[in-house]
Amino acid sequence: MVMIRTAKELKNAISDLENQRSEQYVQLKEHFVHTVDQFSLVNILKNTLDEFKFSNEFVQGFFISIAGLLSGFLAKKVLFKKKENAFSGMIIPLLRVIIERFFSRSPKRPS
């Protein structure tokens, strides 16, 4: 700490501190705006999606989920359709077993 001995030195020290305070206030205000912007819902979702965009496990899991939903939809349409003839009565249970076995296997995870 510098010893202040005259009134002129005191005024200079006060003006230096006021300038430093105003610069720090501007920096703090910019940092606050940046922080608030980072915590907005849109940016949080965007950053999360950017992390998952190139994730191979996410893409693989997404397609497996879509395939499961589609197979369930198709199975519902096929299995709960009115049986019009004997052929569809034999094919539907066979098709159901095939679909269940195909999608019940756990996906292989990359190591």
Image: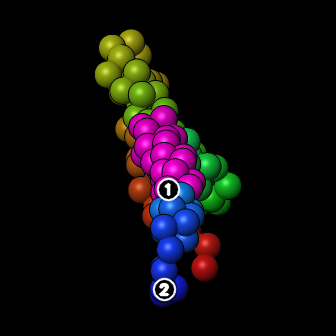
Label 1: which residue?
18
Q: Percent position (x, y) of residue 66?
A: 51, 39
* Front residue of 51 and 3: 3
Q: CA distance from mark 1 to mark 2?
A: 18 Å
Task: Please tell me whether residue 8 is drawn above or below residue 24 in the rendered image.
Answer: below
Q: Residues within 10 Å of mark 1 (few under 14, many from 20)?
A: few
Secondary structure that dominates the magenta span: helix
Q: Percent position (x, y) of residue 96?
A: 41, 40
Work out whether mark 1 precedes mark 2 in sequence or the reverse, and give the earlier one. 2
Q: Secondary structure at mark 1?
A: helix
Q: Percent position (x, y) of residue 91?
A: 46, 33
In reply to whether residue 51 is colored magenta, the answer given is: no
In reply to whether residue 32 is colored magenta, the answer given is: yes
Q: Secondary structure at mark 2?
A: loop
Do labels 1 and 2 touch, CB within 8 Å?
no
> Residue 3 has which mark?
2
The magenta stretch spans which residues?
Answer: 17-44
Task: Please tell me whether residue 64 is drawn above or below residue 92 in the rendered image.
Answer: below
Q: Residue at x 48, y 85 (%)?
A: 3
Identified by mark 1, the residue type is Glu
* Front residue of 49 and 94: 49
Task: Please tell me whether residue 12 is drawn above or below residue 39 in the rendered image.
Answer: below
Q: Residue furthest right?
A: 54
